[in-house]
Amino acid sequence: MEYLLLFLEGLVTFISPCILPMIPVYISFFSGGGTGESEKKGSVAWNVAGFILGFTIVFTLIGALAGTFGALIKTHQIVVNIMCGAVIAVFGLNYMGVFKLRFLAKSYKIDYEIKTVRFVSSVLFGMIFSIGWTPCVGTFLGSALMIAVSSKEAAKGIIMLLIYSLGLGIPFMLCAFFIDSLKGAFSFLKKHYDLINKISGGILVVTGILMMTGMFYRIISIFTI
């Protein structure tokens, strides 16, 4: 259940106002100068794969650190669950618009120019993306990290952030092939941002409360019997 939640958080991160409006720009950037239609799509898919790999490397390393930190303080499991749950709930309330945390509504621009788009440069761009956009996508990334901390294992933290990255990366890859076909879906999502934000934020608030009360892992244990 926790893995499904992390995957969904990755999907919601993709459709957030920070990323979704920029998708056509990213796809155009990753086209890499392909001439024919098939060549162009192949080039885009290859470069997008590098981009996904880049931010996945950074996020999984952060997940390993989060899991390791959780392992170091595992003797204080109740306190850790309460703190992590409280942070997730606050992130959820912020996403619902109950209040605004300014540091989650901004991104950092890194002045680095990539002249020729290739797989390796796309990996590098993915790493830069993960660092520069972390504050903006911090609501769900932060939630994923709090769950990784509560896991108390470095390996589990890696797996958790890997799944989060898959949730964020799969839509990118789909856009590499179906960008024109998905324009209608993008328009629909943009029109319903407010509702999506409230539902997504509500899920985070419920998750946070369940973690604080110790019910989160009890529910997970029921599904893993």
Image (cartoon, grey):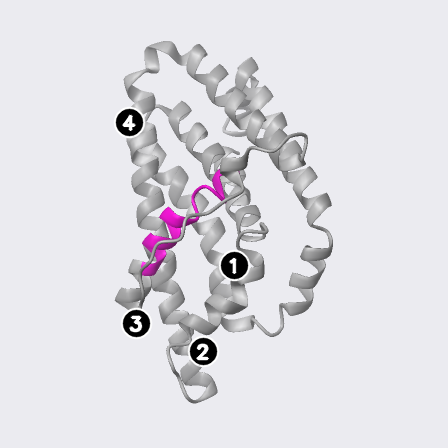
* Distance from the alpha carbon under mark 2 to that under mark 1: 15 Å
Q: Nearer the viewer, mark 3 or mark 2?
A: 3
The amino acid type found where label 4 is placed reads Thr
Amino acid, disc 2: Lys
Determine whether, in the image, residue 17 is placed left or right of residue 43.
right
The quarter of the picture where residue 112 lies is: bottom left
Nearer to me, 27 or 164: 27
Residue 182 falls left or right of residue 159: right
Q: Residue furthest bottom?
A: 36
Whole-percent x, y for residue 151 in the image: 39, 26
Q: Amino acid at mark 3?
A: Arg
User: Magenta segment: does it hold 26?
Assistant: no
Decide which of 158, 119 is in the foreground and name it. 119
- Give the Cα separation between the discs numbered 3 and 2: 14 Å
Disc 1 versus disc 4: distance between alpha carbons? 29 Å
The first of marks 4 and 3 along the sequence is 4
- Residue at image coords 66%, 42%: 197
Contact between labelled residues 3 and 4, with CB atoms less than 8 Å apart? no
The residue wearing badge 3 is: 118
- Cα distance, mark 4 to mark 3? 34 Å
Which label lies toward us, 3 or 1? 3
Magenta stretch: give its range.
125-139
**Residue 153 at x, y = what percent?**
32, 27
Q: Tell me if mark 1 has few (under 14), some (14-19) or many (20+) residues whose alpha carbon lies within 10 angstroms of its own.
A: some
Identify the residue under disc 4. 68
Relative horizontal placement of residue 60, taking residue 21 as reference (left or right): left
Q: Which circle's residue, 3 or 1, is located before the other in the chain?
A: 3
Check disc 3: other Cα within 10 Å, few if <14, some if 14-19, many if 20+.
Answer: many
Residue 171 tag number: 1
Task: Say which mark, if any, is on residue 41.
Answer: 2
Q: Is residue 129 magenta?
A: yes
**Identity of the amino acid at label 1?**
Pro
